[in-house]
Amino acid sequence: MNIGEVASQAGVPAKTIRYYESVGLIPTAARRDNGYRSYSLTDLHTLRFIHRARDLGFSVAEVEDLLALWRNKRRKSAAVKAIALGKIAEIERKIAALETMILTIRHLTAHCHGDARPNCPILDDLAGGHV
């Protein structure tokens, strides 16, 4: 398969595939006589794996670890679970931070009159003051 075909089937842009090659998530593609990249079914499966993992929020480094475990038939599922649990904890921290942001912005907007006056507690807070 050429890069366009594998990109379409994996659901990622060709540019992303070249990036994954450059960071070592997938091996550099073989080249045909005409110089075009050539990808195998194994490459396609790997790209789908990477795409799904990235969609779930795993970093490139985490995907690299997951790929190594996926390829290692002697792996322990506990290692995979530990990575997934770490990702859950990270996502939960981000959710908590977003919830705090929402509460803060709600508080600020509740104290803003939103009228023609120039005083604005939202801008005051952003500038370092407090409501």
Image (spheres, helix red, strand yellow):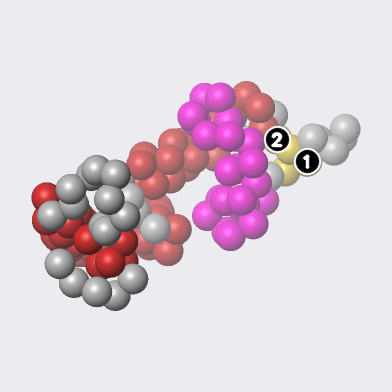
| Residue toward you, 22 or 32 | 22
The answer to whether residue 72 is seen in the rendering is: no
Q: Decide: few, some or many residues near mark 1? Use Cα within 10 Å; few <14, some 14-19, many ≥20.
A: few
In the image, the segment drawn in magenta is: 7-28
Closer-to-camera residue (119/22): 119
Query: What residue sits right under mark 1 in the picture?
Result: 31
Q: Is residue 128 left or right of residue 32?
A: left
Determine which quarter of the picture holds residue 8.
top right
Secondary structure type for disc 1 = strand
Question: Label 2 neighbourhood size at 10 Å, few (<14), some (14-19), many (20+)?
Answer: some
Gap in Å between the C-alphas at discs 1 and 2?
A: 6 Å
Q: Quadrant of residue 4?
A: top right
1 and 2 marks in contact (CB < 8 Å): yes
Is 128 placed above or below 11 here?
A: below
| Magenta highlight on residue 88 | no
Q: What residue sits right under mark 2 in the picture? A: 38
Task: Kindly indicate the quadrant of the structure image that contains residue 1.
Answer: top right
Q: Is residue 5 visible?
A: yes
Please state the horizontal and vertical placement of residue 45, each as a whole percent of the image.
46, 36
Give the residue type that dot 1 points to. Arg
